[in-house]
Image (cartoon, helix red, strand yellow):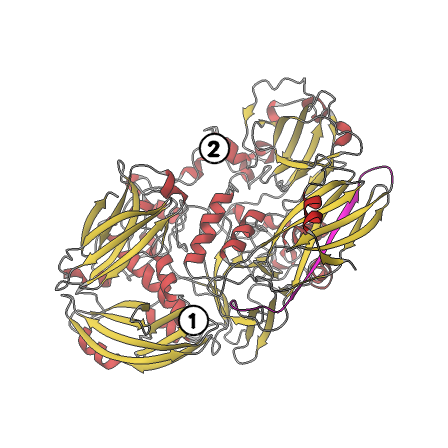
């Protein structure tokens, strides 16, 4: 073992070791493509740099065939209206329609000495053959949407440095009939790939089934030895807190070393962290791959990684190098966090309990499909979407099993914002046989053995575990959505592959299995998914760790007009069967009669604004109802679902275009770490504390306001709440029922610290004795003053002041808009939204994000239930 402190001179020596021209770059532009019908040449011929690409089309790589067709305006935008129906479906036109050649010319001269050049594909759906400069690179056709590919192309690089890469991409062998079922007729699951592409209850089918070179293609240059799949494990013993001195943590590092040369190589694998060094000398046989374990490192005073809401997300950067003859043959830069995740069985709730660094965490999660239905991924979009989840005060994202293993850039964003990740593998109860289903082609016994190629599934599992295992945000593996994979796959994953290649994360058998949440209620083990009354969220005891429960999520008018044709911008009928055809096509889930208490309307703008009141109330109640019973009924909850990769009209906190709606801010309010709230079933006021510290000396202030702004102080009392606990305080149901019986009322709850600063606040709008919000419908206007000013390079501070003597300025939407078009600038991020301001008070919220600094000529738009629309220049 060799672990020591480096002197300054040693550190400088390490920093300036000569490199064997190791570098990596993407092949992400300049691609061309052609359908196989117009290309009769062979791969050897097409990949010859002298072959003329006459009539070929510019291609989008990374991207799917459909993305390329859309970018070339050969198909209409499938996100808008009924356009998707105008695009030929692979099931009807045949696989050849979406079978394409992709070609890329690039410059790379042959390596010198022992240098090696590698070609990497991070994702091709579903099969491909690869050619370079007249040579076939793939020994056999590659299959597997999730299986990475790496090829040593050193022997085939052109002496001139002018090279041509040609790839023929084959669609999934079983595209499935998109007959309206979950995953269509189910046969899409015979492949090892995404199932949702044949359609689901929240999406229409992707017509090419996402065929294409959908993820990154890179060229990497190394010396004789390449570092592959480094593995970092961190051990954090004991019970920790985010603040204060830390006991040591242990870092364990290993990696595969591939010697591509014809001779044995002796060298050292090493890394440095915080001035400490770990090194291991090794001799590698020719054309061999060896796993090397470095000595353990004990890191004193580590900076730990915590989930959002519990502490900071400290990240470390490791430079892992293989040193040989005084040069670095290869270097891998790895970012990781120091943390340890534990799980226990809570015998009281009958569900899995999660701990991070020894501290139990109440899981507040959201279900995620993928960032974009056509696999148009970007680091920036991932960052925005995960940031929205952090802003909802969530601490976990579950990746649903009918989609994909999410990309490294997604996990980088989760590392940054503190979102734990629950990663399903590629199985679903719908396609893989859990239920009888008249939409499915095959019976349950047949579907239970999907996919057709079990060995490919297992090879893909092993590969994806290696790709993702270093991210601190990755918390759990899961066999599949609502069902395990076939027995041989399941046992190989659970008992062999994941223990051997990871060994640090709990494996859930499937998403709502008894290993997660013991089902004493019967039924599927998750849900419900539609509109519910607010008291229902508080009073109905559902599954103890509900993996899927949620409600509505329609955006406001500006969101709707982005993807609904003008003639379909109509108010939905409360009876779902009578809804507009385009709304149905975009999977509208009905609000039933929940809008009616706010006043019936046939104006869509008014309807959509009232829908935001419902949205806010639904998700605040969901998060509060589960939090009120944490550790008693529940150990966690995961909302179904928080985002849509397509322009669906259900289950989303922000729309496909990254415009948030009131669901996001209702969830944000209900899931606040230290929060005061009101149970509508028995009138109990309680405080929930989702932190590790005791909350003491907090003044609870309860007030009621009528529609004209007159207030009634109900009580002031000092309260406290222990860490990770719920404290019931008092019931005020009787007095509130009386105050609200005529036309409703506002109920304000606040926690103040000893400096009389607001620690948390909550404002409910209560219905009248008939269950209607009659007072909201006649509220006098609030004459607010609004100011906006720059608060930094990419931040704006907006202050809404409501003078004393008037009504509550209720439910104000704040937006950053283009000054000319008055359209929203997206994405930007609001510290809060749909806010209300009490008489005689003011509130300031911030608008932030890169778009704030780059968009010139913006204004702030504000409007509310009783606040007229205003545009403020700053």
Of badges 2 and 1, the one in the foreground is: 1
Looking at the image, tell me whether mark 2 or mark 1 is earlier in sequence order.
Answer: 2
Is residue 849 magenta-colored?
A: no
- Residue 557 screen position, x and y as percent: 29, 47
In this rendering, is residue 66 above or below 605?
above
Q: Could one spot residue 201 in this view of the protein? A: no
Please identify the quadrant where the C terminus is shown: top left
Q: In the rendered view, does 507 fall on the left or right side of 576?
A: right
- Residue 194 screen position, x and y as percent: 58, 48
Q: How crowded is mark 2: few (under 14 residues within 10 Å), some or many (20 or more)?
A: some
Label 1, on which residue?
626
- Residue 719 screen position, x and y as percent: 34, 80
Provide the residue span drawn in magenta: 242-263
At horizontal 31% and vertical 52% (from top left) the residue drawn is 578
Q: Marks 2/1: CA distance?
A: 43 Å
Q: On residue 70, which mark appears?
A: 2
- Residue 605 screen position, x and y as percent: 24, 49
Q: Which of 201 and 4 is in front in this view?
A: 4
């Amino acid at each position: 073992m060799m672990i020591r402190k480096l002197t300054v001179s040693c550190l400088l020596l390490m920093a300036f070791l000569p490199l064997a021209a190791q570098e990596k770059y993407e092949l992400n532009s300049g691609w061309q493509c052609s359908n196989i019908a117009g290309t009769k040449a062979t791969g050897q011929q097409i990949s010859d740099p002298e072959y003329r690409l006459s009539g070929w089309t510019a291609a989008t790589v990374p991207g799917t065939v459909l993305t390329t067709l859309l970018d070339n305006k050969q198909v209409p935008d499938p996100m808008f209206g009924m356009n998707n129906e105008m695009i030929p479906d692979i099931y009807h036109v045949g696989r050849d329609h979406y079978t394409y050649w992709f070609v890329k010319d690039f410059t790379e001269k042959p390596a010198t000495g022992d240098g090696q050049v590698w070609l990497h594909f991070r994702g091709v759906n579903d099969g491909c053959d690869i050619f370079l400069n007249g040579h076939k690179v793939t020994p056999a056709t590659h299959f597997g949407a999730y299986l990475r590919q790496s090829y040593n192309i050193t022997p085939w690089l052109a002496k001139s440095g002018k090279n041509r890469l040609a790839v023929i991409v084959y669609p999934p062998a079983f595209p499935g009939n998109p007959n309206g079922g979950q995953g269509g007729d189910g046969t899409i699951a015979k492949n090892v790939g995404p199932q949702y592409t044949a359609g689901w209850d929240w999406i229409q089918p992707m017509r090419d089934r996402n065929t294409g070179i959908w993820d990154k293609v890179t060229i990497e240059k190394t010396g004789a030895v390449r570092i592959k799949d480094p593995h970092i494990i961190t051990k954090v013993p004991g019970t920790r807190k985010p603040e204060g001195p830390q006991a040591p943590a242990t870092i364990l590092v290993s990696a595969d070393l591939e010697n591509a040369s014809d001779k044995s190589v002796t060298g050292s694998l090493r890394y440095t962290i915080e001035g400490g060094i770990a090194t291991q000398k090794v001799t590698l046989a020719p054309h061999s791959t060896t796993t090397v374990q470095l000595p353990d490192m004990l890191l004193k005073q580590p900076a730990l990684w915590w989930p959002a809401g519990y502490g900071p997300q400290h990240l470390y950067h490791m430079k892992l190098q293989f040193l040989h003859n005084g040069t670095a043959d290869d270097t891998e830069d790895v970012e990781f966090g120091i943390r340890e995740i534990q799980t226990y069985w809570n015998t009281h709730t009958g569900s899995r309990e999660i701990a991070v660094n020894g501290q139990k965490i109440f899981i507040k999660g959201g279900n995620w499909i993928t960032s974009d239905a056509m696999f148009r991924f970007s680091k920036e979009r991932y960052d925005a979407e995960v940031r929205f989840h952090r802003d909802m005060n969530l601490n976990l994202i579950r990746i649903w099993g009918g989609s994909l293993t999410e990309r490294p850039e997604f996990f980088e964003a989760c590392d940054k914002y503190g979102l734990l990740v629950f990663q399903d593998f590629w199985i679903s109860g719908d396609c893989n046989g859990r239920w009888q289903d008249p939409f499915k082609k095959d019976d349950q016994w047949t579907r239970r053995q999907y996919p057709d190629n079990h060995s490919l599934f297992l090879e893909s599992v092993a590969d994806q575990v290696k790709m993702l295992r270093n991210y601190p945000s990755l918390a759990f593996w899961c066999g599949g959505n609502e069902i395990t994979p076939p027995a041989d796959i399941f046992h190989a994953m659970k008992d062999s592959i994941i223990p051997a290649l990871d060994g640090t994360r709990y494996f859930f058998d499937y998403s709502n299995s008894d290993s997660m949440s013991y089902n004493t209620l019967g039924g599927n083990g998750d849900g419900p998914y539609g509109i519910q009354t607010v008291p229902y969220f508080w009073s109905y005891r559902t599954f103890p760790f509900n993996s899927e429960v949620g409600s509505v999520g329609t955006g406001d008018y500006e969101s709707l007009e982005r993807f609904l044709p003008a003639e379909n911008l109509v108010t939905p009928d409360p009876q779902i069967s009578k809804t507009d055809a385009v709304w149905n096509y975009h999977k509208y889930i009905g609000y039933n009669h929940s809008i009616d208490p706010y006043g019936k309307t046939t104006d869509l703008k008014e309807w959509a604004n009232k829908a935001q009141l419902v949205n806010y109330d639904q998700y605040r109640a969901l998060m509060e109802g589960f939090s009120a019973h944490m550790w008693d009924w529940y150990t966690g909850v995961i909302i179904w679902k928080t985002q849509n990769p397509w322009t669906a009209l259900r289950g989303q906190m922000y729309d496909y275009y990254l415009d948030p709606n009131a669901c996001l801010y209702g969830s944000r309010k209900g899931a606040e770490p230290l929060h005061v709230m009101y149970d509508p079933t028995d009138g109990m006021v309680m405080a929930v504390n989702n932190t590790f510290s005791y909350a003491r000396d907090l003044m609870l202030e309860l007030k009621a306001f009528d529609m004209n702004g007159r207030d009634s102080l109900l009580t002031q009392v000092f309260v406290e709440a222990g860490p990770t606990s719920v404290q019931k305080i008092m019931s005020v149901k009787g007095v509130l029922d009386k105050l609200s019986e005529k036309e409703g009322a506002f109920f304000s709850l606040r926690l103040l610290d000893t400096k009389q600063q607001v620690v948390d606040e909550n404002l409910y709008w209560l219905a009248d004795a008939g269950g209607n919000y009659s007072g909201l419908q006649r509220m006098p206007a609030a004459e607010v003053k609004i100011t906006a000013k720059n608060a930094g390079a990419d931040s704006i501070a907006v202050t809404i002041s409501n003078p004393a003597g008037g009504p509550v300025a209720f439910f104000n939407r704040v937006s950053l808009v283009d000054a000319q078009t008055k359209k929203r600038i997206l994405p930007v991020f609001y510290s809060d939204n749909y806010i209300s301001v009490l008489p005689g008070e003011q509130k300031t919220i911030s608008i932030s994000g890169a778009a704030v600094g780059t968009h010139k000529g913006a204004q702030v738009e504000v409007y509310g239930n009783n606040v007229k629309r205003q545009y403020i220049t700053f």
